[in-house]
Image (cartoon, rainbow, N blue to C red):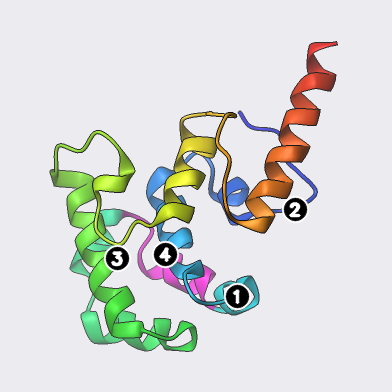
Amino acid sequence: MIPKSPYNLLQEIYYPDPWKIMVCCMFLNQTTRKQVDKIRDEFFEMCPTPQKAISADREVMATLLKPLGFQNRRTNNIKKMSQEFLDKQWNHVSELQGIGQYAQDSYNIFILGDLTVQPNDKILNKYMEWRLEHEKREQK
């Protein structure tokens, strides 16, 4: 179990589901949390699992993702990543379609529990500072 930070990151909300965390990271690519929050509940109602994302109607998914921009690319990447998530013999999430550095760092921190990660993302950095301080307090 991970402690809840004051940042209320999507990674914390969807922990411990690595697939949902990766989808959220894909949502956040080139857009804002505010935009993502407008569509994420509806997306996860439509696609609560990778299997549902794979079988979801492409046009319906793209329409839902339109407010984030790049809806066709996002749709294709989410569908392909979901298929690979289930079927590919992957060793690290970085091997999956559409997974960039932010998602890799998020996976390492939230799923693998690697607190040595030094992310480039401003909010992930703040989270890591908070988390390391929290861990220090817990050890006392």
Residue 134 forms part of the magenta stretch: no
Instruction: Identify the secondary structure beneath mark 4.
Output: helix
Picture quadrant where residue 80 is located = bottom left
The residue that disc 2 covers is 7
Is the Cβ of the residue at disc 3 closer than 8 Å to that at disc 4?
yes
Does residue 133 lie above or below 51 as drawn? above
Measure how far apart labels 4 and 2 are at the Cα level: 19 Å
Three-letter residue code for mark 3: Ile
Of 94 and 49, the residue lying toward us:
94
Q: Position of residue 49 (x, y in %)?
A: 33, 54
Picture quadrant where residue 81 is located = bottom left
Residue 26 shows which numbered tag?
4
Residue 78 shows which numbered tag?
3
Measure how far apart labels 3 and 4 are at the Cα level: 8 Å
The residue that disc 1 covers is 32
- Sequence-earlier tag: 3 or 2: 2
Three-letter residue code for mark 4: Met
Q: Which residues are magenta?
A: 39-49
Three-letter residue code for mark 1: Thr
Q: Position of residue 136 (x, y in %)?
A: 79, 20
Instruction: Identify the secondary structure beneath mark 2.
Output: loop
Measure how far apart labels 4 and 1 are at the Cα level: 11 Å
